[in-house]
Amino acid sequence: MRRTRRKPDKANFQPIIKPVAGIRIRLKYWTPRRTQTLALWGLVALYIVARAWHLAAICLDGDEIFSITIAGSNWAKLTADAARDSVHPPTFYYLLKLWIGLGGDSLMWLRTLPALFSVLSLIPLVLLCRQLRLRRAEINCAIGIAAVNPLLIYYSQHLRMYSLLLLCASTSVWLFHRVIQASPRDLTWRILALTAANTLLVYSHYYGWLVVGFEGIYILLWKRDRFWPAALSTAAVMAAFGPWLYVAAQAALAKGGLSSNLDWIPKPTLGDVVWMLTEFMGFGDFPDALQPVAWVMFVLLVGVGIGAMANRQRRGEGNYAHAVGFLAFFVLGPMLAAFAASVMMKNSIWGQRHLIFVAQPLLVLCVIPFFRLRYRTVRIGGILLCAFWSILVIQHQLRGDDKKTPYDSLVFGVLASEAQSRGPIELYALDRYVHYPFWFYSNVLKEGRVTGIAAPLSPPGREALARAAKRLHIKENVSVEDARGAHFWVAFSNKRWNRPESPQQVLARRDCRSGTALSTGDRYHTISAIPVWCAVVEGRQPGTPAARPTGAD
């Protein structure tokens, strides 16, 4: 006969473990909802810390110098300069000018502005994810990955308009989703909010029109009952953008088009699209030795995502399908449109920074599969994958940013080398970009300012460099054959020097001797400044041996 276990009487049940006097365990406080809320705030704190880390460790680069130069003008000249540039609307420059007026022009304060925009972009991202009915754990995981994403960190510390573009685009997509989900009673106010957000979006960057355009395409494909409100909203945005479009078009025609701004951008290939996705997902910032590992992780992640989508479509859960479809539309749509336009147009407009608003929804898409598949092995694998990736990224970030060039150290090195000399300091820049930091930082020294400087300087050292900076004469975009004088400097980038002989070898044929090169750089290129002494001066026949100058090697 089978024996059955007798169930204990709940009324007379006494716990074996009795509570210890003076200790109260409030397990009800740690509910899953509250735990996820605390985790969210912890990840937001990590997001902020990651952007504040080494925020002012490296000086402003050429593009950032351009921003600060335009923002330093009066309002009328600022608008005119932005129009002459033609490729960026003026909103970021306006905000930067106000920001400088509020807190000064120190490097830390300047870089806080794009970092602030990056942090604020979390608000529309979280609100959109909640509207898409994603789980709190999915939202937290996406924010955690975004917090240490190398590409997002880089542009959050870059004094350009790309963090503002990220914020405005995220806000626009969130408000657009509110519009397509709105009841007739709430539709008017939501359309007005979307119109205001889209106006700010297109004034922050021209790529904002891609977001506005794909919102219209979404309406035509799936929400035709919202066609007329959306059409009126788009018409209002176009009308608001019209004055700036006229001013920018006049400036572009006056300089003969936009080729001078766009001719450096190569035509993209399908491999570039895949690589951009890889970079947005955080796998593109590793050293070359880890690139194979990054590619394996990327392929695994894509495979898991495809498997999860196929699995959930069979189960037919509408919330998941809507969230994935909506996010994928605003990830792939703008990327493919930019790719097609770059291939077909005379000048390419392809660029990862212009599409930075794709990165955050892409990370959300990467996270969803690991939570939707009901296989413990996949979830554990996802956790290990994210942990391994995070460790690699954090280690790379702790070693310092190798994507920015410390131009100020190079400029100060040249000036310090000439501090004891007399007479003018001639510097020949062998391409059209390398002169820019020399011009900017020498002017900063002459005017006694600290704008954009990261290198430490003592007051006596600053005064000596300022005196040398007053004697510096820069000639931009010249040929090395045109560099003349008994003593001068040549500066060049190895990325733009495309001759088989080095500048030192070319100068040696003119009986010139080169000193020790001062160099700095990043992972992409090296900038060098070389002191040169020549025994042959203008009007003298070449061929006479030149004496080796003291200190040259």
Image (spheres, grey):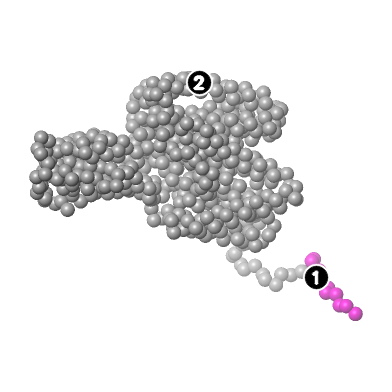
Residue occupying image coordinates x 42% and y 28%: 258
Magenta stretch: give its range. 1-12
Tell me which label, 2 or 1, sits earlier in the chain: 1
Q: Given the image, on which type of amino acid does mark 2 rest?
A: Gly
The image position of residue 399, as x and y in percent, is 39, 56
Q: How many marks?
A: 2
The residue that mark 2 highlights is: 242
Quarter occupied by residue 15: bottom right
Q: Assess whether mark 1 and mark 2 are in contact (beta carbons under 8 angstroms).
A: no
The image position of residue 218, as x and y in percent, is 65, 33
Tell me if 519 is positioned left or right of 10 in this view. Answer: left
- Label 2 to label 1, Cα distance in Å? 79 Å
**Looking at the figure, which quarter contains the N terminus?**
bottom right
Q: Please tell me whether residue 277 belongs to the stretch shown in magenta.
A: no
Q: How crowded is mark 2: few (under 14 residues within 10 Å), some or many (20 or more)?
A: few
Tell me if 7 is positioned left or right of 213 in this view. Answer: right
Tell me if 4 is positioned left or right of 529 in this view. Answer: right
Residue occupying image coordinates x 41% and y 50%: 53
Residue occupying image coordinates x 41% and y 30%: 259
The image position of residue 251, as x and y in percent, is 40, 22
As drawn, the label of residue 8 is 1
